[in-house]
Structures are given as structure tokens and as C-alpha cells.
Image (tube, rainbow, N blue to C red):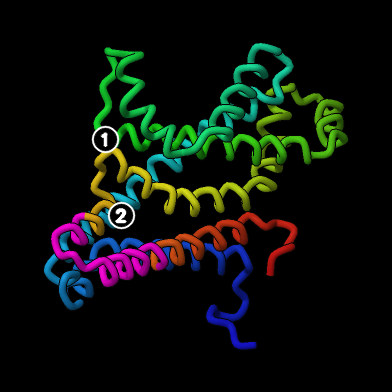
Amino acid sequence: MLSLWPAGWSRQRRSTATMATASLGLLLILWLITIPLAMAPEPIGNNAQLFADGTRVTVQLTVVSGLFGVLLGIVAALGKVSRIAPLRWLAGFYIWVMRGTPLLVQVLFVYFALPELTPWLRLNEFSAACVALALNVGAYNAEAIRAGLLAVPKGQMEAARSLGLSRWHTFIDITFPQAFKIALPPLVNNIVALLKDSSLAFTIGVVELTNAGSQVKSTSFQAVPVFIATAIIYLLLTTVMTQISDAVERRYDIEGKLR
């Protein structure tokens, strides 16, 4: 089979190149998306800028909430496996609530109800959507990371302690890197799913891709071309992000299980 990459390149180098290429492709899409949209027939062409702006907001929501979601997932996972009972209870309660209630309810709660509970905290539409999305994906990330932590053989930790490593260094140098690598596939899948879940920010007025399509449909009364165009843009974004996530998995596939 012919390879797209030069002979002698390692799997890690190929995956890094794929990751860089897909990331560059995503940036080019965000930068140049107005051009192909402007060439589309009405009502898409004359609303190309609105669709382009909505696409960029969708990616911004995904990136910001995805990064904070990973951090929340790490903290919640550590709390869930902690020996301190209150931390376990708090992390368990957070995961239980976030996974047991609809994301739509969480978005509406953060935007409408949270200001009533904390009058000193006022969030705009974009910030509220990021908070709700991060809290939601963080709960799912926590379970993925917790499963990774539990999958690390105890013998490795015992061997590290026998070599004189402290509990902290054992966790940082031995346990967590392996656990994170094990949890990486579900983590990247959660980020890709987050791109589609970000469409619920439409309910609180964030002008992301779904909201942009709805506005065009309301003014043009042409639902079919509008939502076909919206679906194609989502499909393009998820395809590129899937390529990035696959490259990330292969980049850290030290044992060579992925081909």
C-alpha cells in the first residue's frame, strides 16, 4: 500500500503531521468559509457572512468549553478516587447531576437561574453557554479519566514506591500519564460530540451556526436549503475534528495498538 508520508517516518511523526494538517485545514475553513458560501444560491449566498460568523462562534464554544471540560474532568476524577470522603461525595454528586439532567436544562439554568442564586455573577450568553457545556462534558470526562486511573496496574505503583518515589511523584510520573493515555479515546470523542452539543447555545441567544441558520430560515422562509447548508457545515467541522482526534490517539499510541 502506498503511503502519503515519506518512508522512514515513525507512526508518531505521521500522526503529528496529520494533526498539523487537519488543524491547518480547520483554520482555513474558518478563514475562507465565506467564499464558498457566497457562491451558493439564495438564501445561503446573500447570508454567507452570517453563516461564517456562526461557524466561528460554534468552534469557539467547542474549544473553550472543551479545554475547561478536560480540566474539570481531571479534578472530578481525582475527587472520585480520593481517600477523603467529602471529596468523593462532592465529585460523585457533581457527576450524578450533570449526567442525569439534560444539557438543555443545564444551559437554561446557568443563564436564567444562576444569576438569581448569585446576583454578583452576571454572565453574557457566550460565557453562560461555555460554563454549561464545560460542566456537562466535564462530568463525562471525569468518568473516562477515573476509568483510566483504575486501569493502571497497582504493581506499577508499588514498584515506583519501592524505588523511593513519593506518592506525588508516583502519581505525576507513573499513574496519571498512563491513565490519561487510556482515557484519551473517550476524551477526544467527547470533544467531537461537544461540537454538536454546542448548538443548544441557540436557546439562550448565542448566534452560533444553528442560530444563524434559524435566522436565515425565518427571513427567507426556505427551510430546506438553509438546514441542508447548516448540516453540511456541521458535517465538515466534525470530519476535520475527527481527523484531529484520530491523529491525537495515534500520536500517544505508544504500544502500537492502532494502525
Q: Nearer the viewer, residue 152 or 143?
A: 143
Q: Name the quarter where the C terminus is drawn.
A: bottom right
Q: Which residue is mark 2?
A: 210
Asked if residue 214 is positioned above or below residue 4 in the image, the reply reads: above
Q: Main secondary structure of the magenta part?
A: helix
Which image quadrant for residue 231?
A: bottom left
Asked if residue 74 is positioned above or below residue 186 in the image, the reply reads: above
Instruction: Indicate which disc, 2 or 1, sits on the residue closer to the N terminus.
Output: 1
Q: Residue at x 63, y 55 (%)?
A: 252
Whether residue 20 appears in this view of the structure is no
Q: Position of residue 51 (x, y in %)?
A: 22, 61
Single out the residue that lies furthest toward the front: 221
Q: Nearer the viewer, residue 62 or 171?
A: 62
Q: Position of residue 126 (x, y in %)?
A: 28, 38
Answer whether residue 240 is magenta in the image: no
Residue 129 located left or right of residue 32: right
Q: Which mark is residue 125?
A: 1
What amino acid does circle 1 point to?
Answer: Glu
The magenta segment is 215-235
Q: Name the quarter where the N terminus is drawn.
A: bottom right
What amino acid does circle 2 point to?
Answer: Thr
Q: Residue at x 69, y 65 (%)?
A: 258
Q: CA distance from mark 2 to mark 1?
A: 15 Å
